[in-house]
Structure formats: structure tokens, C-alpha cells
């Protein structure tokens, strides 16, 4: 069976986190602008009741039909919080809730890092090292690129714990001051921002390559989930070309960038709708690069079922994705997972 390397779960009511929080912080968060955010976020901009959406159903880890890495998506939004201390309290509660409620013999969780407190986040990763319920860490994107040494405490802790890193956008990037910018300048509409999300992946891949992150952390593995994968060959060609032309400007980058990507970077099938007609683009991918693509359903948000991915990409992808997922996830056997 394949592995779903990124599916989502969230609390239906933020009040569900109160029992995990210290008492003073429960009072801090017990206000509608926060507790009502689940419903408000589900409805986006309310221009008509026709666009009203109910909160997502509760995630049932026993019901998953394949092994899965479960990402508590609500934690990604802290990249926009101005109350940095409260952001840490919220993430601690959400991560603990995920461990208690969303792990099973088939599912493990992705621990969300607090990007506002990297030293504290590194310590939390170390305290959880060896917890078989944790499959990876996720970093909410910030304006500071991932190749910066600022992220080194988190990458060091993750590699020491043997955990890969998952990068997924929260959807608000490019929407407000302080969030990661997109493509030159702020865009005034959500469609443009959504279309340009792959630029975040491309920019951060280039940053990690040319700022030497993988020399500092030679075992680091990073999955860019939700960005698609068809952009990879063109990016690798450009990385290699400019490295050849200007490598004297960065003598610390001793290896061809495409080789470094193939050794450290992973991409996801979602959204597979962007990859129709593989006969038109498959020839751009080397076999080693194809081995870096993993199945992600994005469920329960407008997700891609595995059968749909295989129907779209072709029957040979069934075995390819079945092999690639475990190579990234390193999921232990079901008997070893702590339920």
C-alpha cells in the first residue's frame, strides 16, 4: 500500500484545546474572535449563505485506509500571529492534542514548529525524539528563507531526531505584512496568490541550495507538499545553469544543485490536476527525480484520492508512489507505533 505523506486534521472547536492549556491561558483564549475562528475560517468571505461551509468532520485515525502523515493544519497559521507567546501556547496545545487523538497503527502526526521561537522549538523536538507517534516536523513559512542560518536550531534538532521536514503553505502567504511575499509585490486577489504558491517552494529550494543548508545538515530531508511537482525540471535546469556561470561567486556550493535536490528535496503529487497529459512533460524528468515525488492526498480539503492520481498520471505511477512514500516517511511497522 502507498503512504499518504500529507493529509490534514484539525480540531472542530478550539475550546477542545482548553483542557491542555494552563488555566490562565484558557481565559486568555476564551473569546469569540479566537474560538469562533474555526467557523469563520470555514466560511471565508461571507457574501451569501450559499457559500456557507460546515466545519470539517473530526479526524478518525482508525478509519484511514492507508498509512498517513497527519498535519494539524490549523498550526500553520501562526506565521501571521503578532502575539508570539500565545502562538507558542496554542501550538503546544495543538501538538499535544494531535498526539493524543490522531495517532493510530496507521497514522502518525507532523509536529508543528513555532517559527517565532526557534530555540524553544528545537528543545521541544529533542524532548519528543524517539516518540514513534511523530513522523516529521512542519515549519510555517516566514519571510526568512529556509536556507538562512536562523533555521539551523530547528534543522539540527530534526536531523538529530531523524525526522524529515514538511513545508506546506497556510494560504495566507502574500496576504499581509510579515507573511512570506509572492512574486515581486503584493497581489490584490486570492486567485493570483493561490496560483503563485509554487514560487514559495522554488524560492526556498534555491535558498537552501545556495546558502549551504544541506552542507550544514547532510542528512536533512525536506518535502514541499501541496505545491505540485511539474516545476521541478525547469527549476533544476536554471539552478545548474546559473551555478555553472557564477559558481566562483559562491565557492562553498561545491556540488551541482540538481544533484543536491535529488539527495534532499521531495515534492508531492497534489494538486495532481496540474499534471494531466504526462506524455507532454514526463520526458523532462530523470528517473532519480521521479523517485522524489510522493503521494499526498491533501484530504479532507478538495483532496486527491490515490486511485485518481494513478488514473491521471498512468498505471506505472502506482508502483512508483508505493515505493517513494516509505522512502520519505520511514514509517515504522504497525507493531511499533504507539497508539
Image (tube, rainbow, N blue to C red):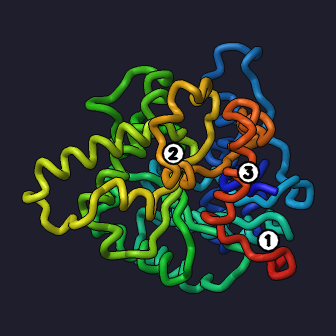
- From this viewpoint, is residue 205 visible? yes
Point out which mark residue 169 bears.
Answer: 2
Are the residues flagged by discs 1 and 3 in contact, CB closer than 8 Å?
Answer: no
Q: Is residue 95 above or below residue 35?
A: below
Spatial CA distance of label 1 from label 3 is: 33 Å
Q: Is residue 295 above or below residue 123?
A: above
When asked about the image quadrant of residue 301, the answer is top right
Where residue 45 appears, as percent x and y from the top left, is: 60, 23
Point out which mark residue 319 bears.
Answer: 3
**Residue at image location 58% in from the left, 86% down from the top:** 127
**Residue at image location 29% in from the left, 55% down from the top:** 207
Q: Is residue 1 left or right of residue 197?
A: right
Where residue 260 appears, as percent x and y from the top left, is: 36, 61
Q: Which residue is mark 1?
A: 100
Spatial CA distance of label 1 from label 2 is: 25 Å
If you read the primary sequence from the N terminus, does the residue marked by circle 1 or circle 2 appear first?
1
SS type, badge 3: helix
Mark 1 or 2: the one toward you? 2
Q: Is residue 99 above or below residue 84?
A: below
Q: Which residue ends up furthest to the left in the rendered image? A: 248
Spatial CA distance of label 3 from label 2 is: 28 Å
Q: Which residue ends up furthest to the right in the rendered image? A: 63
When asked about the image quadrant of residue 177, the answer is top left
SS type, badge 1: helix
Please state, as top left, top right, bottom left or bottom right, where the N terminus lies in the image: bottom right
SS type, badge 2: loop
Where residue 152 appears, as percent x and y from the top left, is: 35, 73
**Residue at image location 24% in from the left, 58% down from the top:** 210
Crowd band around label 2 with a 10 angstrom C-alpha radius: few (<14), some (14–19), many (20+): many
Amino acid at each position: 500500500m502507498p503512504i499518504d505523506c500529507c493529509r490534514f486534521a484539525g480540531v472542530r472547536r478550539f475550546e477542545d484545546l482548553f483542557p491542555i492549556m494552563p488555566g490562565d491561558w484558557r481565559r486568555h483564549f476564551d473569546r469569540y474572535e479566537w474560538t469562533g475562528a474555526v467557523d469563520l475560517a470555514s466560511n471565508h468571505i461571507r457574501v451569501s449563505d450559499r457559500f456557507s461551509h460546515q466545519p470539517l468532520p473530526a479526524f478518525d485515525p482508525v478509519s484511514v485506509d492507508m498509512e498517513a502523515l497527519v498535519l494539524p493544519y490549523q498550526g500553520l497559521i501562526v506565521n501571521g500571529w503578532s502575539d508570539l507567546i500565545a502562538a507558542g501556547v496554542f501550538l503546544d496545545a495543538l501538538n499535544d492534542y494531535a498526539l493524543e487523538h490522531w495517532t493510530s497503527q496507521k497514522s502518525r502526526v507532523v509536529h508543528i514548529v513555532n517559527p517565532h521561537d526557534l530555540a524553544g522549538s528545537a528543545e521541544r523536538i529533542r524532548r519528543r525524539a524517539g516518540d514513534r507517534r511523530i513522523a516529521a516536523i512542519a515549519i510555517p513559512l516566514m519571510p526568512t528563507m529556509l536556507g538562512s542560518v536562523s533555521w539551523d536550531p530547528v534543522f539540527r534538532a530534526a536531523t538529530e531526531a531523524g525526522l524529515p521536514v514538511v513545508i506546506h503553505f497556510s494560504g495566507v502567504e502574500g496576504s499581509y505584512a510579515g507573511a512570506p511575499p509572492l512574486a515581486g509585490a503584493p497581489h490584490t486577489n486570492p486567485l493570483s496568490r493561490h496560483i503563485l504558491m509554487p514560487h514559495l517552494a522554488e524560492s526556498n529550494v534555491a535558498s537552501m541550495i545556495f546558502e549551504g543548508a544541506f552542507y550544514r545538515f547532510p542528512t536533512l530531508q525536506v518535502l514541499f507538499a501541496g505545491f505540485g511537482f511539474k516545476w521541478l525540471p525547469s527549476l533544476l535546469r536554471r539552478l545548474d545553469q546559473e551555478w555553472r556561470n557564477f559558481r566562483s561567486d559562491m565557492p562553498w556550493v561545491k556540488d551541482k544543485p540538481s544533484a543536491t535536490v535529488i539527495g534532499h528535496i521531495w515534492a508531492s503529487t497534489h494538486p495532481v490536476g496540474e499534471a494531466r497529459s504526462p506524455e507532454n512533460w514526463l520526458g523532462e524528468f530523470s528517473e532519480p527525480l521521479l523517485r522524489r515525488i510522493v503521494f499526498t492526498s491533501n484530504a479532507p480539503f478538495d483532496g486527491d484520492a490515490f486511485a485518481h492520481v494513478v488514473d491521471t498520471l498512468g498505471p506505472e505511477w502506482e508502483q512508483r508512489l508505493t515505493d517513494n512514500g516509505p522512502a520519505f516517511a520511514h514509517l515504522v511497522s504497525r507493531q511499533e507505533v504507539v497508539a
